[in-house]
């Protein structure tokens, strides 16, 4: 593909092609009701997902002890991190208040994939059970743990392509419900994730290719079997809506903690981005809930900036980082994606403010800072979230964004929410190795 015309149209793409750290500001972002004109999803879609998750809550408590504390609702803490804020303020131009949304510690799967991934498995299980006439919406869903249902589910297979965490979430939840499950893993996937999945009864197929390849081959294998269902990370609106549920819940946490969000106290959210499903779904919800008072940025590795390239060229899923001569290789395994989702970029056009890219070495520095200051461990991919609030005040383009949105006068009031997307399931010895990694 000849990318010259894109480099002329969007100068920032030159820096991206050179794998330089940078920020892309989205000029197509809209405000007010304009955002929702011709938008493919609305609040009823979120409500539908919330209701479904409530129906399943008693069953989840039955199966997963770590969901008991939250009554079967898989949700993570929101935490003020003043010590991390202090450290970063000493080293950088950061202003405002810093919070951590700890999806790194979500029940069952220990990553943000515990939202979308498990939701899609439950959605599929419910549909199969209802279509067969065995389940009604007002039943107590704990009946799904009976031998009759487990035998029924065992006739079906669920398959997914993954760099790791989606595989864990789909694999663990599907196997627990009684499905056969096959996870197609890319070459970035860590050995411990494969081992953990196999120990839960999932079949793991390894490929020598990247995430895009794993998805493609998984989809093909699944399509050959009429009793198999493929969780399609590149195209699934079910995954997307599972993620969107996060927004009303964080809104309540924000209110409960007395954090103000309004024009003079804007909320900035920073989401690590791979294929785009998880940040996209969460962003849709956030925009519905906070409107123009929220500003949403994604972070991608300089070696895998697929969403940036997709959105900035307008080609979305029809372009990949390899077209830009970029290899897609990064220590942030959850973000090691070369081609973005086919639909998320388009849907995010009126919503997100921009995308930062960053080098891998800082992932480990942020990880050490967070561990030393707050005694919280999150995985390298998740640490990318901290790049946003820092660089917001450093790049000319992002400072211009603050200025144009009249936010320079209130910059001390900004509430920054770094979205920690994974970490709890990382084995201790591997976490220790990460903490000793200097690139
Ligand atoms: C999957 C993942 C992401 C990104 O989610 P996408 O839906 O692929 O964009 C970010 N962080 C971690 C830890 C992940 O596992």
Image (cartoon, grey):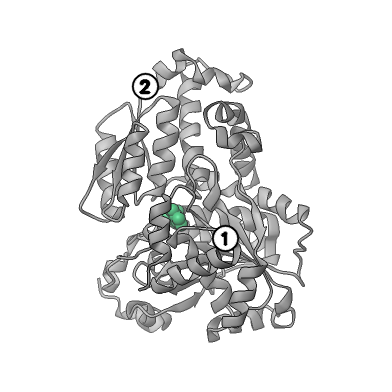
Residue that appears at 47% across and 43% down: 109
User: Crowdedness of circle 2 by 10 Å Cα count: few (<14), some, many (20+)?
Assistant: some
Q: Pointer 1: residues within 10 angstroms few (<14), some, or many (20+)?
A: few
Q: In the rendered view, tell whether residue 74 sits above or below residue 345.
A: above
Query: Looking at this rendering, what residue extends furthest in the left direction?
Result: 208
Q: According to the image, label 1 marks what residue?
A: 375
Q: Nearer the viewer, mark 1 or mark 2?
A: 1
The numbered disc on residue 201 is: none
Name which quarter of the figure residue 37 lies in: bottom right
When asked about the image quadrant of residue 417, the answer is bottom right
Residue, disc 2: 154
Left/right of residue 428 with respect to residue 215 in the rendered view: right
Seen at 70% across and 66% down, the residue is: 293
- Check disc 1 and report its element: helix, strand or loop: loop
Q: Vertical placement of 428 versus 418: above or below?
A: above
- Assign ligand 1 to one image quadrant: bottom left
């Amino acid at each position: 593909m000849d990318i010259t015309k894109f480099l002329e149209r969007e100068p920032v793409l030159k820096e991206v092609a050179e794998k330089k750290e940078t920020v892309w500001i989205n000029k197509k972002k809209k405000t007010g009701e304009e955002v929702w004109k011709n938008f493919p999803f609305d609040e009823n879609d979120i409500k539908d997902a919330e209701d479904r998750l409530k129906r399943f809550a008693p069953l989840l408590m039955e199966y997963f002890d770590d969901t008991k504390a939250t009554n079967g609702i898989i949700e993570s803490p929101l935490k003020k991190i003043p010590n991390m804020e202090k450290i970063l303020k000493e080293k950088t131009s950061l202003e405002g208040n810093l919070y951590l949304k700890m999806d790194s510690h979500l029940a069952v799967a220990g990553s943000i994939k515990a939202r979308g991934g498990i939701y899609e498995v439950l959605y599929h299980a419910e549909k199969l059970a209802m279509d067969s006439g065995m389940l009604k919406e007002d039943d107590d869903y704990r009946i799904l743990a009976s031998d009759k249902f487990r035998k029924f589910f065992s006739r079906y297979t669920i398959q997914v392509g993954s760099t790791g965490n989606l595989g864990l979430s789909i694999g663990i939840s599907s196997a627990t419900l009684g499905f056969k499950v096959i996870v197609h893993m890319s070459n970035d996937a860590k050995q411990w994730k494969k081992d953990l999945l196999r120990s839960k009864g999932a079949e793991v197929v390894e490929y020598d290719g990247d995430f895009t390849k794993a998805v493609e081959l998984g989809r093909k294998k699944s399509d050959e079997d009429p009793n198999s269902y493929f969780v399609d990370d590149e195209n699934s609106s079910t995954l997307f809506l599972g993620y969107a549920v996060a927004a009303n819940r964080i809104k309540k946490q924000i209110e409960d903690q007395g954090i103000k969000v309004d024009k003079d106290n804007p909320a900035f959210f920073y989401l690590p981005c791979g294929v785009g499903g998880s940040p996209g779904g969460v962003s849709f919800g956030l925009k519905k809930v906070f409107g123009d008072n929220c500003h949403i940025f994604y972070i991608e590795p300089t070696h895998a900036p697929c969403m940036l390239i997709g959105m900035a060229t307008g080609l979305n899923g029809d372009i990949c980082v390899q077209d830009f001569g970029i290899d897609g290789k990064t220590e942030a395994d959850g973000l090691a994606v070369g081609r973005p989702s086919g639909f998320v970029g388009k849907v995010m056009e009126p919503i997100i403010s921009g995308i930062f890219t960053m080098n891998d070495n800082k992932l480990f520095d942020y990880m050490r800072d967070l561990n030393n200051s707050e005694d919280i461990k999150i995985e390298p991919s998740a640490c990318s979230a901290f790049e946003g609030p820092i660089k917001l005040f450093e790049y000319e383009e992002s400072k211009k964004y603050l200025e144009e949105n009249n936010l320079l006068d209130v910059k001390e009031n900004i509430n920054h929410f770094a979205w920690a997307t994974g970490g709890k399931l990382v084995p201790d010895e591997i976490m220790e190795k990460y903490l000793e990694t200097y690139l």
